[in-house]
Amino acid sequence: MTTPALLPLSGRRIPPRNLGPSSSSSFPHHRATLRLSEKFILLLILSAFITLCFGAFFFLPDSSKHKRFDLGLEDVLIPHVDAGEGGKNAGGGYLVHGQGRDQHRHREEEERLRNKIRADHEKALEEAKEKLQKSRDEIQAEIQTEKNKIVKGLKNKSSKPLPPVPVPNLVGINSGDPVDPDIREKRDKIKEMMKHAWDNYRQYGWGHNELKPIARKGHSTNIFGNSQLGATIVDALDTLYIMGLHDEFKEGQEWIDNHLDFSVNSEVSVFEVNIRFIGGLLAAYYLSGQEVFKLKAVQLAGKLIPAFNTPTGIPWAMVNLKSGVGRNWGWASAGSSILSEFGTLHMEFVHLSYLTGNPVYYDKVMHIRKLLQKMDRPNGLYPNYLNPRTGRWGQHHTSMGGLGDSFYEYLLKAWLMSDKMDMEARKMYDDAIEAIEKHLIRKSNGGLTFIGEWKNGHLERKMGHLTCFAGGLFALGADGSRDDKAGHYLQLGAEIAHTCHESYDRTTLKLGPEAFKFDGGVEAVAVRQNEKYYILRPEVIETYWYMWRFTHDPKYRQWGWEAAQAIDKYCRVSGGFSGVKDVYSSAPTYDDVQQSFFLAETLKAACSMILECRRCTSARHPD
């Protein structure tokens, strides 16, 4: 029979083997005593047997986890032995499962289980009847309440307290009215423009990433994925604070505290989310000292870290905030990452390590720097494309405009941020600018200094609006430059500022095009229709601000004011501010987008220049 074999040996009836008196004849070599070695072997066997028997108890199921098997379902684990087949009770040496007191106890427990199931079933039916009597709105409200409780519980469970870090003293943020009535009037105008942009976003696009001011509804692009993360709110916080719009700042803070959630299934641009969100949150934290901004910045940074999971450590251009899966833009050269994107993480990530005490952020960006230092650069130039899988350059295209610009800015600002102690960053900046000056900077036939684009050994004589930030960059980097060339770089900055002013002045709207040529007698003018638009960009006004700060030549302040007036005249609509599609047309059409950087950068640069206030900011913002 196989059934008793499932029981432990102590429960089997095993009759002793009777060899009888004649058994000795079956064992002619039997000895009355055992040798020492045989005793040792026998002892080992006995020990192994005992260990096996007692060790088996550790692998028996936990009875507390299998109560259902003890409640009338005994045969599931231990087959039932029928007492009618000769089984005796335990006192007779046979084990029969399910008799006597055990059988009675199991029947009682089985009955209690049935009663409990019946009671639970009836309770569930009563609850279902109550639900059916409620309206659809009441049911949805209850579901939402439960969801909110779960989300709140998860947030409380996952949020770890950050180490206390003193907020630096805020330097040079002016309060009170300017003495000069002209400056006061201009200040008030810039502030009114900010209010107009913010109030309309608050009314028509609140919580959306950006605003469509003509359609009067929210707007977003693929850089923010498919989620509404309130990019304008986060991006504009420091501008609101600096302008003294504290009620609006408080509105933004409350929205961030209650609604900004990064645990969404959304693929975003690592670069854009870093400079607009992490940069915006850190700036707001340093200005206000409110912990919520630091906590949100750290939460988001954790979502970006998986983008660095590449063979080289060069991050992907995009990452899914929920899954952590990254990829690059389909249009980038051979699946490459972009210099201005992976090179524009350093400032924010270094601050994250400072605020949290966690070196992972610092290590990630320093690894990028070390890798770039080891690579050969054609003509000393940094190409705009780098493959994160192979660690090789993509297309040899170098630009100080789009795809390259803020990489050079962050090298210089890393040196400044370190109190001029990060000489590695300063050397990389100086080497790069020397190569750019040698291969990219030229003077047109009309005497305008411009920065072209290097493409596979050929200089394209075209300059973008984004490149105009370089005028301010050269001025900012003049102090500390090699070979006592501070005057040279300040002059170079002035020449670039002049060229960019010409690109504005030669249009009908007095606003600059996206790109402009220096070919065939055409200078500082856009030729292609798809380069004639203006999307509220800040770079030219920022360069004016830098040049005003370093030279105090009043023309830069005047140029900045004229640009602000042109924006107010031609880009203002009833629902906010919109970009225009053709700066050479006297009756321009609108693109119907109020960019988040218009509030974060353009208006802040205008305000800073008028009031001479310094600002604590993030990517692509003056210091």
Image (tube, helix red, strand yellow):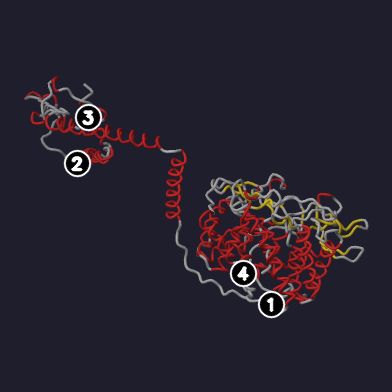
Spatial distance from mark 4 to mark 3, Cα to Cα? 75 Å
Whichever of callouts 3 and 2 sits on the residue coming sooner in the sequence is 2
Q: Position of residue 581 (x, y in %)?
A: 79, 51
Spatial distance from mark 4 to mark 1, Cα to Cα? 14 Å
Residue for point 7% across, 24% down: 20
The local secondary structure at tag 2 comes to helix
Residue beneath disc 2: 43
Say few, some or many: other residues with alpha carbon within 10 Å of mark 3 (under 14 / 14 to 19 / 20 or more): some
Spatial distance from mark 3 to mark 2, Cα to Cα? 43 Å
Q: In this rendering, would 143 be left or right of 558?
A: left
Q: In this rendering, would 300 be left or right of 275?
A: left
From the viewer's side, name the closer residue of 446 and 27: 446
What amino acid type should be assigned to the residue bearing mark 3? Gly
Q: Foreground mark, 4 or 3?
A: 4
Q: In this rendering, would 355 be left or right of 52?
A: right
Residue for point 18% across, 32% down: 106
Q: In this rendering, would 413 be left or right of 438?
A: left
Spatial distance from mark 3 to mark 1, Cα to Cα? 89 Å
What amino acid type should be assigned to the residue bearing mark 4? Gly
Kindly indicate whether the residue at mark 3 contacts the one at mark 4 (C-beta within 8 angstroms).
no
Spatial distance from mark 2 to mark 4, Cα to Cα? 89 Å
Whichever of callouts 1 and 2 sits on the residue coming sooner in the sequence is 2
Residue beneath disc 3: 72
The local secondary structure at tag 4 comes to loop
What amino acid type should be assigned to the residue bearing mark 1? Pro
Kindly indicate whether the residue at mark 1 contacts the one at mark 4 (C-beta within 8 angstroms).
no
Q: Where 113 falls versus 310 (above or below)? A: above
From the viewer's side, name the closer residue of 49 and 253: 253
Kindly indicate whether the residue at mark 1 contacts the one at mark 3 (C-beta within 8 angstroms).
no
Image label count: 4
Whichever of callouts 3 and 1 sits on the residue coming sooner in the sequence is 3
